[in-house]
Image: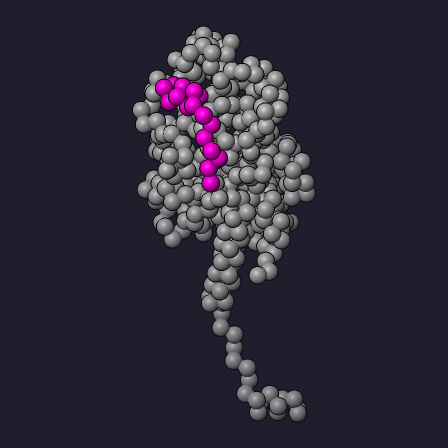
């Protein structure tokens, strides 16, 4: 069946791979929507052009705002949307003012759920954001059935306004390394070629990603085991100081932000997920695709769905010792076979989105016709003919 082209705008915060998995998800979906024949664009609200502009070319746009206090330039968002005239607006950003400004447009809105709403005092603004999302959006994209349940309970999204689209992994790109690839990336990062290496990939944010627990676990392992932390974030300096305090700085490597995490996975012998909540866990499927054993703290979200049936190991007790015990076992054991990851495919996700976009546009057109004023009846034939004769 031929695809009817749809112009869709995905909105993200920054053209920066360290800003989180949400941006990477948006970029991968935009790539494949365009390959399907749609006119898919991505708009980065804050900051300068970056690596994703290089990948997407003219399909990537940048407002260049410095922060949410940059009120003088917020009107450029409305101007941009008016000029692009998207038929669908797809949010990945979680920004209250962006939802407010796009709410006045007639295009159907889709919200991609990338994080778990937390009910804390400091999240009152997030509560207002969620209210505005439910008010203005036609659909919330959930990355798993578990996430759909969480959104129903924690954020009051009804099932008929949610739609499940699993995140994907490019299995041609994320593959187990050859021996020469493994040695090359270890040399790049300053890792001993024969060391056992446990790794972490993600935002260096202790509150959400638990990178501090990764370091504490490493400190309980024998001194021959190295740690690799790939990514950037607000707690990078704190984590480096913690490594010094724990006495493991000599066997911990911080790579800094990586445009592509593939090299980090290729340098590891085991991958650890220490997140406190993770509604999907994009890094988990990437690590699995690279042939790594995955060890994860049990956390709220969909990670357990991915690691079901013995694909990985979930650690129920959230202590450094419990994680270290499992890491030691998998580091001493053989590499597991690469699992079947066919449910996690970007092309499948893009197809599901394409179907959703078409349904939303059809529903809007039908509603517009249904609610439009009834046109007047044509004049009787005799009167019309008489008028013509006169």
Q: How is the image coloured?
A: one colour
**Front-most of residues 48 and 29:** 29
**Front-most of residues 142 and 320:** 320
Residue 226 x/y as whole percent: 49, 15
Res. 66 visible in picture: no
Residue 111 x/y as whole percent: 47, 45
Residue 165 higher or lower than 259, as above or below: below
Residue 87 x/y as whole percent: 57, 54
Q: Which residues are magenta?
A: 324-340
- In percent of the image, x 52 and y 77: which residue is there? 376
Picture quadrant of residue 146: top left
- In percent of the image, x 55 and y 26: which residue is there? 266
Residue 46 higher or lower than 377, as above or below: above
Q: Quadrant of the N terminus?
A: bottom right
- In percent of the image, x 52 and y 57: which residue is there? 358
Residue 83 appears left or right of 282: right
Residue 103 appears left or right of 389: left
Residue 332 forms part of the magenta stretch: yes
């Amino acid at each position: 069946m031929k695809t009817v082209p749809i112009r869709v705008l995905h909105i993200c915060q920054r053209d920066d791979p360290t800003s989180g998995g949400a941006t990477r998800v948006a970029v991968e979906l935009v790539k494949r929507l365009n390959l399907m024949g749609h006119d898919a664009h991505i708009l980065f609200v804050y900051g300068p052009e970056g690596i994703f502009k290089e990948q997407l070319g003219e399909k990537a746009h940048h407002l260049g705002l410095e922060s949410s206090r940059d009120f003088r330039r917020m009107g450029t968002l409305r101007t941009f949307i008016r000029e692009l005239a998207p038929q669908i607006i797809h949010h990945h950003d979680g920004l209250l003012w962006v939802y407010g400004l796009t709410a006045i447009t007639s295009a159907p809105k889709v919200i991609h759920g990338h994080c778990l709403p937390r009910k804390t005092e400091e999240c009152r603004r997030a509560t207002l954001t969620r209210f505005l999302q439910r008010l203005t959006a036609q659909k919330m994209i959930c990355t798993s059935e578990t996430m759909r349940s969480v959104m129903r309970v924690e954020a009051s999204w009804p099932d008929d306004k949610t739609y499940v689209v699993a995140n994907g992994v490019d299995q041609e790109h994320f593959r187990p390394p050859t021996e020469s690839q493994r040695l090359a990336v270890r040399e790049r990062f300053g890792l001993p070629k024969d060391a056992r290496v446990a790794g972490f990939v993600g935002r260096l944010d202790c509150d959400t990603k638990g990178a501090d627990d990764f370091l504490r676990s490493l400190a309980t392992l024998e001194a021959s085991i190295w740690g690799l932390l790939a990514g950037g974030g607000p707690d990078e300096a704190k984590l480096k100081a913690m490594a010094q305090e724990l006495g493991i700085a000599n066997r911990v490597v911080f790579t800094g932000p990586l445009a592509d995490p593939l090299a980090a996975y290729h340098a590891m012998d085991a991958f650890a997920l220490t997140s406190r909540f993770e509604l999907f866990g994009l890094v988990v499927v990437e690590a699995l695709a690279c042939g790594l054993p995955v060890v994860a703290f049990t956390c709220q979200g969909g990670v357990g769905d991915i690691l079901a049936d013995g694909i990985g190991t979930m650690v129920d007790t959230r202590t450094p010792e419990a994680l270290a015990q499992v890491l030691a076992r998998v580091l001493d054991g053989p590499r597991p076979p690469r699992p079947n990851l066919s449910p996690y495919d970007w092309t499948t996700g893009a197809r599901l989105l394409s179907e959703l976009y078409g349904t939303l546009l059809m529903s809007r057109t039908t509603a517009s016709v249904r609610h439009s004023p009834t046109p007047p009846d044509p004049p009787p034939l005799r009167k019309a003919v008489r008028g013509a004769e006169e």
